[in-house]
Image: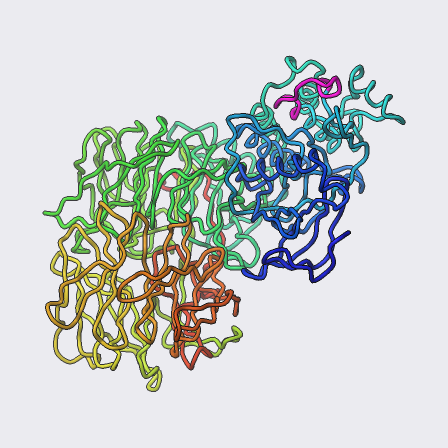
């Protein structure tokens, strides 16, 4: 009997049926714990007792649980209740490929995109030891995030499969019924079954290649590869006949695509393409050739005004740039400038990189939904596309062959194919600050900009990172970041932050030595541009200076290449520019991630700005709610604390630590003092000062130069401070500093994972903090001041920057897409909490990027929020300027 609306299976409530077939019934349901819509598949009551049906059901669960890929369905959960076995999957909105094909012929670029995503998914399954055995249009779902391969109910799992452990994620089969699906000896759907399957032989990965060829043919030709009026006739067609070339149905199909489909549909498995990976590589090559066709006009900029660059001029400029890939451009070569617009209603994030071959630009953009993602825009195209699986990404950098992108996200360094595909985690990187990739597959990177760290190296295949540079404590080195390999792949340049900002510098290093050579003092990172220039920013202008990469020496004078460059001052020292080896330069003008403090009500309605339009971050509200202390980075790269008085609408400087970095202010519970961190005196320490500004600072706690401290919170009873400790040997741990007695700091949580951004509950009995122990940042609560008695994960699908309501009855945090989330809690009898719910979409910088302790404060009993908000008028949506043959103008 079908399940009715309101039926409960464990924590899931059935809402409505989706589809049904002989092998399963699928329902739309609600996960009552996490307040999300899911899909549940159950066995039909009339077949649930059959051993073969139950075996297929269990096979599907084992197979899907072993796979984690953006274009493959994965499970949320499995269970059994009242004799009903069920699988819980993600609920997808879209249509099957079969339904789409009913509407007529598909454009070639769309068909290729779906084919590439499907081939990538099936290739991943094969590498995991799983053969699908029922690949067909009805088992490919088309969603807004791309194609999804569904229904592994007939999958064959080999001995090397990783099946067995259930993982998070999930997907849903929208359609269970399809024509000519056989049961018994013939496993699969006839129209897409390989000859060896029809003969009852064992199916392997090559059988999926055949089925894929039939699906691809149907997308390109607009008709099935094999058709007949009867099952017997259909089997004969598959066994004895080849379909007509797809190019006979559409002139858009290139000859190479016809050849690929013919190879996939070969009758003898030995004569077919032997792996889906080979098929994927051919599809990528064919798609690249198709994308090389002329595109419509692109926006361009000349003399500060936007103009339209014709396709012919752009193509000519690209050819000229490629022809002089390894030569110094001659002055007579034309210089062309054009603009690459960001996706609609999005803002530029942290990251811009043009591929070494100059054909594609990768950048980070935060869409209106608040999600930072990697986007790739071919130079000869008008559209950029996002890379699935790169949410919260920052600071991408290319492989030397221009095929792959590495990036930082969720505390990891990861890589992804620039054409799309699964994301591979390489190693830990809590808060990365730049990376580079050489021809030997070595990646250099900075793992944590907030810590005292040298540069590390790791293989492009992943592994355990090892140090490459050594911090020179005599010079005051605090952090080595922004590395970039030079042409020989052994030497590199990098940026040094120091305990004395006046000593920030660009240096050169080598894989063969831990020593570095200072090249020049600088406020921002540098980049190498062939055939021999160093690019860096000075006074907001992008400068170029001749650089001998062999002798590691700058020569001549620096000259301006571009003005009004988007930069973020030291210690981040980031500037948005990138140069290819083919003479193409990209940069972002205007401010980067510029914002200011704004008030919002509980529904997200703007209530007005607070204070001047300044770069005030890490706000902390005074106990009486009348003032806020925040960090302000000045034009000289010094970070100091300022106090904004709401009643007087005035802002005044609180700390004077130049040259130093003062930040992370925390008010005492009576509002008389402010505690903060500073790196003055060449050591990281915690200081306090009267909130009135009278008198000097008092040092509460300090540590050696090889550790970094971050202050989080001050308990309501005034007795304890909670802070983070980061040293080169460990990640972030939480410590407690008692303010009575000896002031001897003690650890609160020391684990292999990073714990940070802690907040003490108003009653002083609980601590909310973020940890990446699950593989991504989530918000947890434990008892305080001694952990134990249970640990509670209050966030769902990621969370950071937790804050308690004044009465302790609600906990807030930012989701990865910057939504403000609220969790009702009770702390009077143990710790109890409800499911999180979204209050409103903020425009705060996406959490996990930049390592902010907090981007907001809560006032008026949870009715008002003061949020550091990205300012759309500040230029963060300005386009990326691209300059072809930039050195011609520089040489002039």
Relative to 704, is 77 on the left or the right?
right
Q: Is residue 207 magenta?
A: yes
Which sits in the foreground, 62 or 257?
62
Residue found at x 57% / y 43%: 74
Q: Is residue 241 visible?
A: yes
Give the percent coordinates (x, y) of residue 215. Answer: 72, 31
Q: Quadrant of residue 514?
A: top left
Q: Quadrant of residue 178?
A: top right
Work out which residue is located at the far right of the displayed protein and give it.
Answer: 229
Establish if 551 lies above or below 195.
below
Give the percent coordinates (x, y) of residue 769. Answer: 35, 61
Please provide the residue range marked out in magenta.
195-209
Relative to 754, is 702 on the left or the right?
left
Judging from the image, the colouring scheme is rainbow
Give the percent coordinates (x, y) of residue 45. Answer: 74, 46
Establish if 483 lies above or below 7.
above
Q: Is residue 886 visible?
A: no
Relative to 822, is 8 on the left or the right?
right
Q: Examine the residues drawn in magenta and state their main secondary structure.
A: helix
Establish if 603 lies above or below 117.
below
Which sits in the foreground, 417 or 884?
417
């Amino acid at each position: 009997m079908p399940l009715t609306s309101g039926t409960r299976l464990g924590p899931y409530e059935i809402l409505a049926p989706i589809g049904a077939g002989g092998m399963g019934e699928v329902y739309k349901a609600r996960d009552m714990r996490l307040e999300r819509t899911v899909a549940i598949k159950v066995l039909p009551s009339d077949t649930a007792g059959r051993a073969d049906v139950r075996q297929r059901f269990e096979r599907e669960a084992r197979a899907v649980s072993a796979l984690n890929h953006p274009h493959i369905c994965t499970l949320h959960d499995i269970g059994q209740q009242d004799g009903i076995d069920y699988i819980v999957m993600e609920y997808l909105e879209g249509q099957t490929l079969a339904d789409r094909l009913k509407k007529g012929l598909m454009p070639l670029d769309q068909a290729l995109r779906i084919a590439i995503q499907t081939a990538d998914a099936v290739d991943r399954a094969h590498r995991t030891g799983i053969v699908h055995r029922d690949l067909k249009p009805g088992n490919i779902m088309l969603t807004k995030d791309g194609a999804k391969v569904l229904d592994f109910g007939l999958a064959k799992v080999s001995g090397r499969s990783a099946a067995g452990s259930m993982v998070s994620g999930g997907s849903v089969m929208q359609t269970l019924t399809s024509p000519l699906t056989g049961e018994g000896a013939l496993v699969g759907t006839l129209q897409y079954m390989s000859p060896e399957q029809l003969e009852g032989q064992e199916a392997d990965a090559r059988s999926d290649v055949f089925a894929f060829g039939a699906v691809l043919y149907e997308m390109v030709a607009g008709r099935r590869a094999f058709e007949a009026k009867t099952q017997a006739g259909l089997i004969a067609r598959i066994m004895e006949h080849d379909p007509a070339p797809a190019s006979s149905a559409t002139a858009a199909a290139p000859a190479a695509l016809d050849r690929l489909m013919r190879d996939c549909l070969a009758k003898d498995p030995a004569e077919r393409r032997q792996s889906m990976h080979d098929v994927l590589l051919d599809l990528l090559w064919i798609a690249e050739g198709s994308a090389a066709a002329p595109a419509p006009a692109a926006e361009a900029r000349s003399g500060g005004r936007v103009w339209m660059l014709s396709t012919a001029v752009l193509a000519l400029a690209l050819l000229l740039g490629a022809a002089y890939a390894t030569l110094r451009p001659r002055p007579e070569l034309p210089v062309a400038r054009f603009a690459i617009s960001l996706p609609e209603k999005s803002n530029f994030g942290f990251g811009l990189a043009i591929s070494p071959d100059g054909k594609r630009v990768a950048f980070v953009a935060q869409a209106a939904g608040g999600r930072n993602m990697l986007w790739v825009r071919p130079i000869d195209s008008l559209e950029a596309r996002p890379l699935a699986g790169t949410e919260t990404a920052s600071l991408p950098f290319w492989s030397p062959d221009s095929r792959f992108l590495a990036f930082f996200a969720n505390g990891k360094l990861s890589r992804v194919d620039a054409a799309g595909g699964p994301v591979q985690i390489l190693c830990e990187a809590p808060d990365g600050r730049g990376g580079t990739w050489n021809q030997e597959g070595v990646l250099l990177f900075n793992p944590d900009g907030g810590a005292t760290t040298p540069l590390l190296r790791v293989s492009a295949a992943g592994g355990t990172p090892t140090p490459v540079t050594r911090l020179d404590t005599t010079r005051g080195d605090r952090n080595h970041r922004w590395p970039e390999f030079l042409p020989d792949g052994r030497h590199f340049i990098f940026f040094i932050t120091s305990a004395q900002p006046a000593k920030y510098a660009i240096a050169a290093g080598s894989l063969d030595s831990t020593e570095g050579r200072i090249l020049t003092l600088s406020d921002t990172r540098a980049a190498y541009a062939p055939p021999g220039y160093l690019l860096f920013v000075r006074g907001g202008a992008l400068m170029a200076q001749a650089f001998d990469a062999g002798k590691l020496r700058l020569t001549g004078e620096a000259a301006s290449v571009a003005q009004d460059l988007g930069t973020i001052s030291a210690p981040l020292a980031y500037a948005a520019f990138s140069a290819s080896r083919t003479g193409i330069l990209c940069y972002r003008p205007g401010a980067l991630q510029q914002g200011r403090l704004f008030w919002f009500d509980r529904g997200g309605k703007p209530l007005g700005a607070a204070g001047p339009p300044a770069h005030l971050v890490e706000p902390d509200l005074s106990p009486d709610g009348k003032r806020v202390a925040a960090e302000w980075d000045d034009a000289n790269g010094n970070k100091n604390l300022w106090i904004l008085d709401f009643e007087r609408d005035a802002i005044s400087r609180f700390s004077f630590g130049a040259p130093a970095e003062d930040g992370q202010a925390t008010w005492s519970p009576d509002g008389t003092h402010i505690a903060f961190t500073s790196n003055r005196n060449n050591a990281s320490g915690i200081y306090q000062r009267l909130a009135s500004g009278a008198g000097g600072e008092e040092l509460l706690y300090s540590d050696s130069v090889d550790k970094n401290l971050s202050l989080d919170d001050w308990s309501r009873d005034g007795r304890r401070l909670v802070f983070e400790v980061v040293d080169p040997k460990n990640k972030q741990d939480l410590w407690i500093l008692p303010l009575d007695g000896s002031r001897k700091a003690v650890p609160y949580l020391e684990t292999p994972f990073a714990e940070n951004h802690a907040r003490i509950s108003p009653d002083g009995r609980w601590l909310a903090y973020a940890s990446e122990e699950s593989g991504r940042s989530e918000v947890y609560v434990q008892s305080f001041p001694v952990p134990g008695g249970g640990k509670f994960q209050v966030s769902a699908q990621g969370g950071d920057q937790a804050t308690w309501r004044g009465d302790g009855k609600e906990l807030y945090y930012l989701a990865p897409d910057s939504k403000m989330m609220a969790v009702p809690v009770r702390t009077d009898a143990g710790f109890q909490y409800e499911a999180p719910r979204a209050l409103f979409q903020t425009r705060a910088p996406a959490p996990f990027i930049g390592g902010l302790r907090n981007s907001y404060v809560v006032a008026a009993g949870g009715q008002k929020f003061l949020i550091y908000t990205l300012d759309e008028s500040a230029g963060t949506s300005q386009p990326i300027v691209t300059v072809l043959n930039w050195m011609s103008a520089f040489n002039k």
